[in-house]
Amino acid sequence: MLLVLPPSETKVSGGVPGTSLDLAELSFPSTTAVRENLIAELIELSSDVDRAKRALKLGVKGDGDVARNQELRSSLVLPALERYTGVLYDALGYPDLPAAQQAFVNTRVGVFSALWGLVMATDPIPAYRLSFDSPLASGKPGKHWSAVADDLWAEAPGFILDLRSEGYRSLAPVPEQRGVFLTLVTPGPRGSRKALGHANKAVKGELVKQLAVTGAHLESLDDFVQWGASEGYDCDAASAKDGRVDLVISGR
């Protein structure tokens, strides 16, 4: 089983003393060449601060994010689940989980970003700024990730529960035979349910935490539906279509 999260725009600064980026330490080596190309393009873009701020949609206080990109190859690294911050990651609360639950997350949770593609929870990465729709010299990141998507998902372990946002899912959708994309929606008639909205990120973090707390072992959509029923999550299996399924969230 693999739970795939979106990255966050906000990231913790710094890292483990004496460390720096080593692509050989990242999971899913079939994508190393793509990572190298994207790093090179992002560093080149960031050599011109004003151009980079426009491309990355940064405001007047964005110089620090551009500086992070300039130093990608030499800056300190942290495990991915400690690098990303924000509502989803706060709700998951990885640093405060008991050791057994952290071990669950370490082996079953990945993050799919525009720069790194899919990395596992403990993969060491530096702070950076690049979104799924950021224009680089060769185009947007999806151009790179779609070219290696088949090889990437072939490397991924087991049944995949995709919790990314629509934008990050578009970089490399999970094949229907490998997993399912969860659409968080409010209650209503099937086919006309509305997206959950502002609570989306918190619910995703809480969901992953509960999977860790219970030590869930999911090998199919049916397994997730059954687990959800026992834990208060309403996954509407009958809504499954085109690789996605409704997770109906009430009271948020």
Image: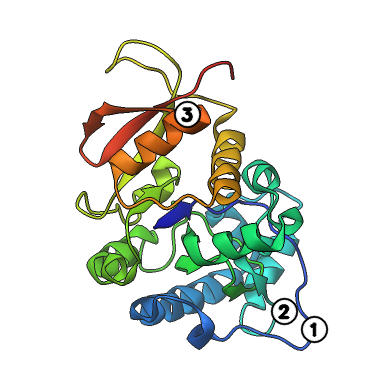
Q: Residue flagged by tag 2: what amino acid is it?
A: Leu
Numbered tag placed on residue 76 in the rendering: 2
Residue 209 drawn above or below residue 203: below
Q: Of residues 31 and 230, which is closer to you in this image?
A: 230
Front: mark 1 or 3:
3
Name the residue: 49% across, 24% down. Answer: 196
How many tags in the picture? 3
* In the foreground, 222 or 154: 222
Point out the tag, 1 or 2, that comes first from the N-terminus. 1
In the rendered image, the vertical position of residue 232 relative to residue 94, given as above or below: above
Q: Secondary structure at mark 3?
A: loop
Left or right of 117 in this view: 88: right
Q: Residue at x 34, y 43 (%)?
A: 223
Marks 3 and 2 sit apart, C-alpha to C-alpha, by 39 Å
Q: Residue at x 54, y 60 (%)?
A: 130
Query: For residue 203, what is the image quadrant?
Result: top right
Dots 1 and 2: beta carbons under 8 Å? yes
What kind of residue is marked 3? Tyr
For disc 1, the marked residue is 17
Percent across and percent down for residue 98 are: 72, 57
Question: In the displayed structure, does residue 213 sit left or right of residue 185?
Answer: right
Residue at 37% in and 17% down: 193
Distance from disc 1 to disc 3, alpha carbons, whole Å, reads 41 Å
**Crowding at label 3, few (<14), some or many (≥20) Cα neighbours within 10 Å?**
some
Q: Determine whether the residue tagged by mark 2 lies in a helix, strand or loop.
A: loop
Task: Find disc 3 in the rendering and name its residue.
Answer: 233
Give the image location of residue 216, x and y in percent: 47, 49
Nearer-N-terminus badge (1/3): 1
Point out the tag, 3 or 2, that comes first from the N-terminus.
2
User: Given the image, on which type of amino acid does mark 1 rest?
Assistant: Pro
